Image: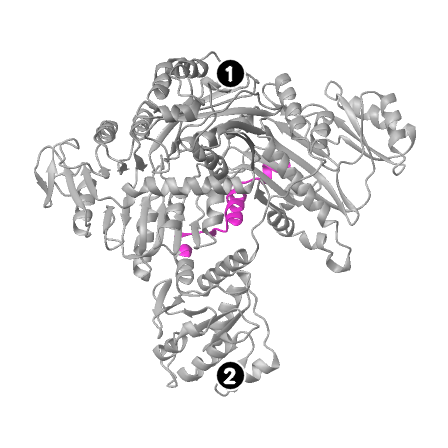
Amino acid sequence: MTDDLLDRPPVHALLADGTTVSIRPVLPGDHDQLRGLYEEMSPENLRLRFFAASRRAAAMAADRACAPARPGYRALLAEVDGRVIGLAEYDTGGERAGADQGGADKDGQGGADEGGADKGGAEISIAVADGLHHRGVGTLLVEHLVSAARAEGITTFTADALSENHEVLRLFADLGLRTSRRFEGPEVRCTIHLDQDDAYLSAVEARGRAADVASLLPLLRPSVVAVVGAGRTSGSVGRAVLHHLHTGGFTGRLFAVNPNVTSLLGVPSHPSVAALPMTPDLVIVAVPAAAVPAVADECGRAGVRALVVVTAGLDHPQAQALLTACRTYGMRLVGPNCLGIAHTEPELGLDATFAAGHPRPGTAGVAVQSGGVGIALLDGLSRLGIGVSSFVSLGDKYDVSGNDMLQWWESDGRTELALLHLESFGNPRAFSRTARRVTRRIPVLTVDAGRTEAGRKAAASHTAAAATRTMTRGALFIQAGITATRSVGELLETAALFHSQPLPEGSRVAIITNAGGAGVLTADACAEAGLVLPPFTPTTTADLLAVLPDGAAVGNPIDATAAVSEEQLTECVDRLTRCSALDAVIVALVPTAVAAATGDDLVRAVTAAPGRRGRPVIAVRLEQDRSVRLLPAADGGTIPSYAEPQAAARALAHAAERAAWLSRPVGTVPDLDDTEPERARTIVEEYLAAHPEGGWLDPRICADLLACYSVPQIPWAWAESEDEAVLAADRLRGFDGRVVMKAHWPGLLHKTQQHAVHLDLRGDSQVRAAFRDLETRFAGLMTGVVLQPLAARGTELFAGVVQDEVFGPLVLFGLGGTATEVLADHAARLAPLTDRDVQQLITSPRCAPLLLGANGNTPVDLAELEELLQRLSRMAADLPQLAEADFNPVLATPGGVTVLDARVRLLPRRSQDPYLRRLR
């Protein structure tokens, strides 16, 4: 273990029961605690741990863990409240990890005998304190060791255990990693392969989800709640929260903390948290910012499990002290600077907010960062009759996040719809993976906040210039299956449709109206939203005319005229929903003075037994006073009714997109042949050792790096003199007879703009003239030239990747060439790309028809194009130091795909495992 590892701060994570544990490197000062960890073990656990009940082994084990840092060795410990409860180690050195050092246990003890690790492997040993088995301590430590080992290039763990130690064998089997066993008498050698595949990530997710939900129980299902900071006078936030808790039907015990009174609003009050007659599960903190850290510390000492801090305006030291108290004492934290929380199940009735009214119980889970957005959503969902299952105002989001809430809603058995407003993401890749799973079960909708920027970030490459915040967030939402809306109003309009109607099977819509103008407006809105209005077959047309009044026009939209009756409209809607060529029906109504049917009669036609129709039916009523309403239907359901055709069309388009996402198979990240990630890491490390600040690779190093991932490159040669250029051109002319010459110097990015390219060079004299021209114009700058054969004709594309500091690697694709930024025809997805992601990435830009064979042309080699993007994705995922990669142009033809020009920029960045279980 090297010295820099010892300097890393501890991380916090959750055990299986929701307890917060600190995981950090072992330090020399931990010797006494580690020795005590072993000395307090029972004889049986010592035997399982060391293959013999030896008390002397305790001192030896502590000595080993606390020895000076050495390469190939790492030791991590877990502690709670300052007490060491577990230790995990690996060693690649081949030293004896054996009879005195042991193997592992199922959150208990195990043993290993001598024998070093194989090449690329390490021996592992684990110990967990007696009395703390079966809480996930050992498993969590192993996960962190696995992550650390992968970063060091270790590919396998080995451990030897007694064959009777069923718990250790189960631990390894349940990790989700590929394992093998070899039995030798009473012992068994386990080999654990550290490949990070989907099976392992899914197993880690399942453990994390169970721990996360357990940790949120004191927050969202508390039995005892206290409010600190409720004042005697009206107008204080704390008093408003206390009032809501008292009047909202909370079924548990409720207390106020105020040293000046014995009762507030009929609620018993005590001078301090420590003076309460019972320990609260949850404390609402509404004191001035300066007092928050002390209150948090008092709560932690008293054994409180969760805090909601509504106080705003904490400075950095106060914020740090608050979070430190929560981590030290294992309290989950909502806020600060938040509206509060609510959990509406009847047996609890928790409303710890200071919103204007109590939230209506229902089925929508809501998590917001903005209190104002939260109030708007609570009001809108209550007005629509959807209501909320649970509401969390995340505020500044120091701890509990949208990811936590998604996992809660996935497991709570009540939530059918999830609504999010997130202004920032702490771990977008983990969030995306969670959301992909959750959205398969319930719809997840969000307001895409923070879409605009004052301007694009200063960017040198085409890739960085294209990677706007909107594109990055859009990639996250698309890949995760999240429905992203542009406003709170649109969010509620879409939620109304998702709540009340089945999803359409496609985007084919029929419009029926009693006023031609309303039909035209609705048709325009549908077309603008990407919906399709197919023409009716003669049979369908005759079928509809048979039930409509004289004068009706059956196009699409259908003008049923103002003379249509309730019965006629009902029958027409029923027939449309039975038509297999349609996916949804929109009924656009306006009130008229015609006696055939009143406005209410026509509404009844729309709401007549929608459950039997099987396809979504929605109404547009131009006179409606609210943007969306849910109309009660005859069968007990509801029908969404919109005041504007645009709102109806947008909501229906979102529903069609969700249905399409659900219909696609879950993608997988394919294995790639002919990759050399270890050689690529060596190239990166050597470059950064010589250039500590990072920079753009010269063509030779860039080509070597791309070759590690078998990226198809056009043949090329490097020359630093006129004669070298002529010799290189002679070698390359065998491909076509003509060559291209490109100048190079450090920092040169846009060669065409600098007029640093000569095309279509024939013969030695033209090559010499071109070299002399570049050498003269760029004297003092140019370090050499790249020569390539002149490429054949084809479609010029662009592919690139940029490492976002928050979101990770983002792969971009679109139309290439010198006008790539002007045309801005790009799509993006977050790496690592699945096979489905790549297919969508290729078909999303406007230029996609050119690739697929538009106008009778031959399609390009799509398989080669998909593989190029997969290789680019793999390279970005493997190399966190890869800040930008820019392939422009990429030549695509029916015969293959070739990168004609590539640039790569490296920065000194440390790898961080986005899927490692840890708190924010």
Which residue carries the number 2 mark? 552
* Residue 359 placement: quadrant: bottom left
Q: SS at mark 1?
A: loop
Task: Name the side, left or right, on which 392 lies relative to 473.
Answer: left
Q: Residue furthest front?
A: 185
The alpha-carbon separation of the residues under discs 1 and 2 comes to 83 Å
Q: Which mark is residue 2?
A: 1
The amino acid sitting under disc 1 is Thr
Based on the displayed image, in which of its 4 quarters is residue 562 positioned?
bottom left
In which quadrant will I find the C terminus?
Answer: top left
Q: Between residues 685 and 84, which one lies in front from this camera angle?
A: 84
Which label's residue is closer to the chain start, 1 or 2?
1
Q: Position of residue 530 (x, y in %)?
A: 55, 61
Task: Look at 15% across and 31% down and name the residue there.
Answer: 272
Whether residue 461 is visible, yes or no, is no
* Horizontal side, residue 733 vs residue 205: left or right: right
- Check residue 481 for magenta coloring: yes
Which secondary structure class fits the magenta region best?
A: helix
Q: Is residue 608 above or below residue 753?
A: below
Return the residue found at the far left.
262
